[in-house]
Amino acid sequence: MSRDLTKEEQQKFADMYGTGTKCVSCGNQDVIVKIWEKHGTNAAEIGGDISPSGIVGALVTCDACDHAETVARARLLEAG
Ligand SMILES: [Zn+2]
């Protein structure tokens, strides 16, 4: 399952992975960060573990231009 991060979590996500605060294509700062939780973790809950041990993937999407940036598992692990 997946869910969208809250604005607060989005900031944490950005600190951890270096992306997720704005659209890399058009610069819009009102992006949505969607995460897929790892089985057996609490990442599906607000305030849950969004570190590389809690999620298997993420997607940063922009409503303004429809750009979507995939944050792959490999990149999550690199950041962690
Ligand atoms: Zn955009």
Image: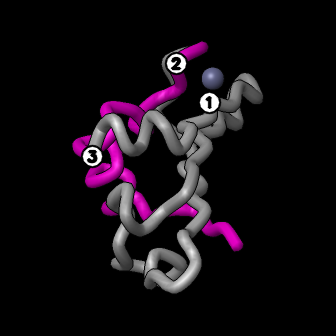
Image: magenta residue range: 1-25
Label 3 CB sits under 8 Å from any ligand 1 atom: no
Q: Residue 32, relative to residue 46: is it above or below?
A: above
Label 1 CB sits under 8 Å from any ligand 1 atom: no
Between label 2 and label 3, give the one nearer the viewer: 3
Residue behind mark 1: 69
Using a 10 Å C-alpha cutoff, classify the residue at mark 1 as few (fewer than 14 neighbours), some (14 to 19) or many (20 or more): some
Using a 10 Å C-alpha cutoff, classify the residue at mark 2 as few (fewer than 14 neighbours), some (14 to 19) or many (20 or more): some
Label 2 CB sits under 8 Å from any ligand 1 atom: yes
Checking the image for residue 24, the label placed there is: 2
Q: Earlier in the sequence, mark 2 or mark 1?
A: 2
Between label 2 and label 1, give the one nearer the viewer: 1
Instruction: Give the Cα distance between marks 2 and 3.
Output: 21 Å
Mark 3: amino acid: Gly
Mark 2: amino acid: Val
Mark 1: amino acid: Glu
Residue behind mark 3: 80
Identify the colour scheme used.
one colour
Tag 2–tag 1 contact (CB < 8 Å): yes
Q: Residue at x 34, y 78 (%)?
A: 47
From the top left corner, tell me how far across and down residue 79 is, in percent: 30, 38
> Tag 3, which secondary structure?
loop
Q: Residue at x 31, y 32 (%)?
A: 18
Q: Nearer the viewer, residue 55 or 33?
A: 55
> Tag 1, which secondary structure?
strand
Q: Residue 76, relative to residue 64: is it above or below?
A: below
Residue 9 within the segment the image draws in magenta: yes
Q: Nearer the viewer, residue 51 or 11?
A: 51
**Ligand 1 appears in which quadrant?**
top right
Q: How many marks?
A: 3
From the top left corner, tell me how far across and down residue 74 is, in percent: 49, 37
Using a 10 Å C-alpha cutoff, classify the residue at mark 3 as few (fewer than 14 neighbours), some (14 to 19) or many (20 or more): few
